[in-house]
Image (cartoon, rainbow, N blue to C red):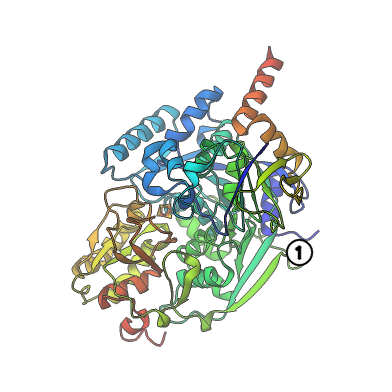
Amino acid sequence: MAKTLAQKIIARAAGRAEVPPGEIVTAKVDLAMIHDSGGPRRVEPILRDLGAGLFDPAKVVLVSDHFVPGDTEEGARILALTRAWANERQVAFHDGEGICHVVLPERGHLTPGMLVVGGDSHSTTGGAFGTYMFGIGATEMAGVLATGEIWLSVPETILIEWHGRLGAAVTAKDIMLFLCGKLGMDGGQYQAIEYGGDAIAALSMQERMTLANMAAELGGQAGLIAPDDTTAAYLGKEGAQTGAWEDLRTDPDAPLLAHHVFDAAALEPQAAAPHSPANAAPISACEDVAIDVAYLGACTGAKYEDLKGAASLLTGRRVAQGVELLVAPASRRDQERAAREGIMATLENAGARLLPNACGICAGYGDHRLGEEVTCVSSTARNFKGRMGAASSEVWLASPLTVAASAIAGRLADPRAFLPPGRSAA
Amino acid sequence: MSGRVFLLGDDIDTDQLAPGKYMRGGVEMLAAHCLEAVRPDFAESARPGDLVVAGRNFGMGSSREQAVEALKHLGIAAVVARSFAGIFFRNAINLGLPVVKASDTSAVRDGALAELQLAQGQLILRETGERVALEPLPGHLMALLGDGGLIPHLKKRFAKEQGQCA
Ligand code: SF4
């Protein structure tokens, strides 16, 4: 019978030949990822209570990112606890190396066809690599760590295809904001979202990660992209063993819950008004909004390519008077690469202030939070009221390019107006 | 179980259920501010056994379990909604909070006295005698809820496995 990519992965992990949508199955997880916020401090007491050890320490990865750099007393305490746990439980630990969803693939932990759970809602990011990865809460994570198993309802698949070529300064982030506006935050119905079409195939792995990441905003359980040569090339470079991935795709006649087809060339840069990603509209409809802060951060919006894109607009320019541009590169490795290529210098020369390689203001846990009545344009994934600071602060979501353009203009701005010469017709 | 109904709208998110700014204060503080953005009287007037009836996509947003814990802390016995955000749904089952879908809740009024009959798949409105049909939960999830959530369920399982070894 024709199967979806999601069904193929889940069937293998559940040890079943067929897994009909809607059926509750128990699957073995290939990897479990936890971070400092939902990880040790919350799972350890439960493991103690159960009297259980880790099902397999080699299949557990811990990342510190939410409370890094530990600039509050509470944050410092949580980081200390996290470090002690990593040591005691002998798991792979990436400490202060960046945001979990970026660090995981960067360090070769994910390969196509794996079934992975993460203690974070944006764990969908792993789907960019053809990994069925989804987010779970701490109690459930404790259960997984103790047993190596998870229950899940076999999802249906919502196929979202983009055809044609994205215009200059139009990015994966714009695709996702557009989809949030179009389909709404429950459009995914906790099913598997799969992205396809030649516009998606043309995207780099980091752009694909943005699509998979924000499947969470669409309410999908997972956000998948079938592996291809781009995937294999990326993973090969990170030293991951990809195995056979050619069959890891949705069969042409597999039943779908929904099938959407969009024209990439028609997409404009988007921005989502406070306080929901679903409030997305073309940037041309929101240009009279003055901003105080431009935030280039988060797993969704501060990877190497995001920094590079922002820098391409900021070269030889400065941020507008009174606007603060904050940059929190998503991983140390991405920052180092950007530094080698002069990208960090460009950002700093433009007036950017650098924050640690961590969740920063996106998580809203540290010292840096948005103040009362601050208007911010942000490359992050969600702008719920009060998430990034004061309840009176207003956050507009946009692509890293639009964040950079807005920082220069002092108000929400169309990045196409700031493209370096020669790229406007790209 | 029976109690009063708090009737809420669509898209109740986890930041409303467990506001991020009170995250450091533990479940008690989170519960005290639960839903204050949409229903300022909620924490104060909720009594053990009360029910939440909501619209679509209840619990959307982050994976934080505190969203479930805050409701449990206030004694909310179950949430009935048109639909749930997936992670919230999982968390609720795993923490032993019954979450049940109902396609038509139009008969339910705010403050109504209602009795949840989970096994029968219905919500009885006491004052009018009306029945609201609920979508049945699969047996596996009923078993988890029956044990009080994932951890008690696993404890039982581990105890059994140890028992077999002995
Ligand atoms: S950067 Fe933001 S969205 Fe990404 S994991 Fe951290 S808190 Fe979550």
Regarding residue A191, the answer to whether it shows in the image is yes
Regarding residue A197, the answer to whether it shows in the image is no
Q: Looking at the image, how many numbered discs can be counted on the residues?
A: 1
The residue furthest top is B166
Vertical side of A99 occupied by A44: above or below: above
Of residue B141 and residue A40, the one placed in the foreground of this image is B141
Residue for badge 1: A255
Residue B48 on image: x %, y %: 57, 35
The residue furthest front is B127
**A25 lies left or right of B9:** right
- Would you identify the image quadrant in which residue A302 lies? bottom left
Residue at 28% from the left image edge and 59% from the top image edge: A372
Of residue A332 and residue A239, the one placed in the foreground of this image is A332
Residue at 37% from the left image edge and 69% from the top image edge: A400
Vertical side of B100 occupied by A402: above or below: below
Q: For the C terminus of chain B, which image quadrant? A: top right
Of residue A322 and residue B31, the one placed in the foreground of this image is B31
Of residue A262 and residue A200, the one placed in the foreground of this image is A262
Residue at 45% from the left image edge and 38% from the top image edge: A39
Residue A410 on image: x %, y %: 26, 75
Q: Amino acid at mark 1?
A: Pro
